């Protein structure tokens, strides 16, 4: 029960990154936080596949979040490069 609830709640994190990519401008993206979220979701996606019984709903939300955060990082880096900023 709690595994499914956590996975469903985790989709909020993935959904927020996807929504931000569609609606927000890239200057508000934190590269530090985006990097942390990529590592965090990568670790939890792996754990969700290894644990018995597998929690594929949780793995799916974290794999989606890795992709969404990687897109956010790309957007932020492109913005900073285009504006001559350094981080």
Image (cartoon, rainbow, N blue to C red):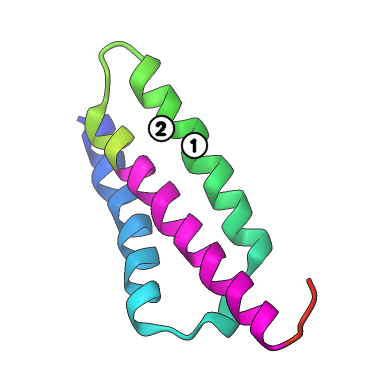
Residue 42, label in figure? 1
Looking at the rendering, which quadrant does residue 28 occupy?
bottom right
Residue 84 falls left or right of residue 2: right
Q: Is residue 40 above or below residue 87?
A: above
Q: Which residues are magenta?
A: 61-83
Q: Is 67 inside the magenta-drawn segment?
A: yes
State the residue in front, 82 or 44: 82
Q: Residue furthest top?
A: 52
Q: Quarter of the image for the N terminus: give it.
A: top left
Q: Callout 1: 10 Å neighbours few (<14), some, many (20+)?
A: some
Q: Main secondary structure of the magenta part?
A: helix
Residue drawn at (36%, 41%) of the image: 63
Relative image position of residue 34 (x, y in whole percent): 57, 59
The C terminus - image quarter: bottom right
Residue 24, relative to residue 7: is it above or below? below
Membership of 9 in magenta stretch: no
Q: Which residue shows up at 42% across the image and 83% down it?
A: 24
Circle 2 is placed at which residue position? 45
Q: Is there CB contact under 8 Å for labels 1 and 2? A: yes
Secondary structure found at label 2:
helix
Residue found at x 60% / y 81%: 79
Q: Nearer the viewer, residue 42 or 81?
A: 81
Q: Nearer the viewer, residue 52 or 22?
A: 22
In the picture, measured across the screen, residue 38 lies left or right of residue 83, that is left
Secondary element under disc 1, as helix, strand or loop, is: helix
Residue placed furthest toward the right: 86
Q: Is residue 44 left or right of residue 51?
A: right
């Amino acid at each position: 029960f709690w595994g499914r609830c956590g996975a469903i709640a985790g989709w909020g994190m993935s959904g927020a990154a996807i929504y931000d990519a569609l609606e927000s401008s890239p200057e508000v993206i934190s590269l530090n936080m985006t990097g942390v979220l990529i590592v965090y979701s990568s670790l939890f996606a792996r754990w969700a596949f290894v644990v018995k019984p597998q929690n594929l709903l949780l793995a799916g939300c974290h794999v989606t979040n890795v992709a969404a955060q990687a897109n956010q990082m790309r957007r932020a880096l492109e913005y900073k490069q285009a504006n001559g900023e350094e981080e």
